[in-house]
Amino acid sequence: MKTFWVGVTVTGVYFLLLGITVASLKLNVMTSWNELGDFLAGVFSPVAFLWLVLGYLQQQKELQQNTRALELQAVELKNSVDQYRDMVSVARDQLKMDQESINTAKFEKENQYKPRIKIPSVEPGTITGGDTYSYRGVLESAGEEAMKVLVMTEPPFAPFHGFNAHSLKSGRYNLGDSQYIQANSLPNQIIVTIQYESKLGIAYVDKYTYILAEKGKYSLIDDERI
């Protein structure tokens, strides 16, 4: 707007000086249209050039303003993106903390209701003649009640193999005695697998590996809980 009024002022002063000049020099009246055209062309050329320059300057000024506006928008957009990124990071951290809390609570609840079943030992209950053994099966359950209990051995080894129960409360259970087995018929290794569920319906599998030691007794060498 300032440029416009500068142009108006300069144009007004120009025509004022032009009028004074024409009057003071007492120029002759033009006698043809060609002379009038040349006169008008000469008079308005500086004015046209002036407004051309002013228009260019005004356009440059507007372009600079638009550039600054775009730069401000870019800064605001960047700030918005940074704020959004921070919000996402905070939400992610909160979600992670919530998930950890849920997992901790779930683990504590599972551990609270998890039964604990084991075979305390695999050893002969009766020995006859020094080389014939009968094994008494004992199963111990601790903690909460165990559901759908199944005991399997590899190779099949009585009286543990095939034992199953709908539920087992905390206590010590006698599985009975095996038939007499010759020492040379004893397997060198027995893998006992105990499958059961908690009251929450969570399934567990415990594996115990025994190797034959002296006098028909088996020693535990490895245990795995899944």
Image: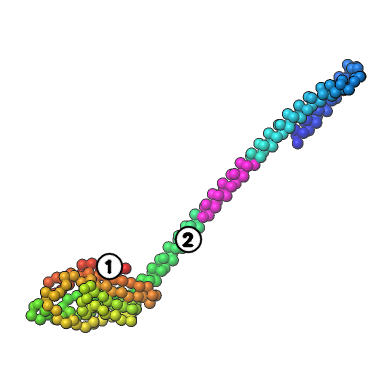
Q: Residue at x 80, y 29 (%)?
A: 9
Q: Is residue 17 visible?
A: no
Q: Residue at x 33, y 81 (%)?
A: 166
Q: Nearer the viewer, mark 1 or mark 2?
A: 1
How is the protein colored in the picture?
Answer: rainbow
Say which mark, if any, is on residue 100.
Answer: none
The kind of residue tagged 2 is Leu
The kind of residue tagged 1 is Glu
The stretch of residues the image draws in magenta is: 69-88
Say which mark, if any, is on residue 95.
Answer: 2
Residue 84, position in %: x, y? 54, 52
The mark nearer the N terminus, 1 or 2, is: 2
Considering every residue shown, the one lying at the far left of the view is 129
Q: Quadrant of the N terminus?
A: top right
Q: Residue at x 16, y 72 (%)?
A: 187
Residue 216, position in %: x, y? 14, 74
Residue 123, position in %: x, y? 17, 76
Question: Would you identify the image quadrant in which residue 190 lies?
Answer: bottom left
Kind of element beneath mark 2: helix
Say which mark, if any, is on residue 224.
Answer: 1
Residue 10, position in %: x, y? 79, 27
Taken as a whole, is the magenta stretch helix, strand or loop? helix
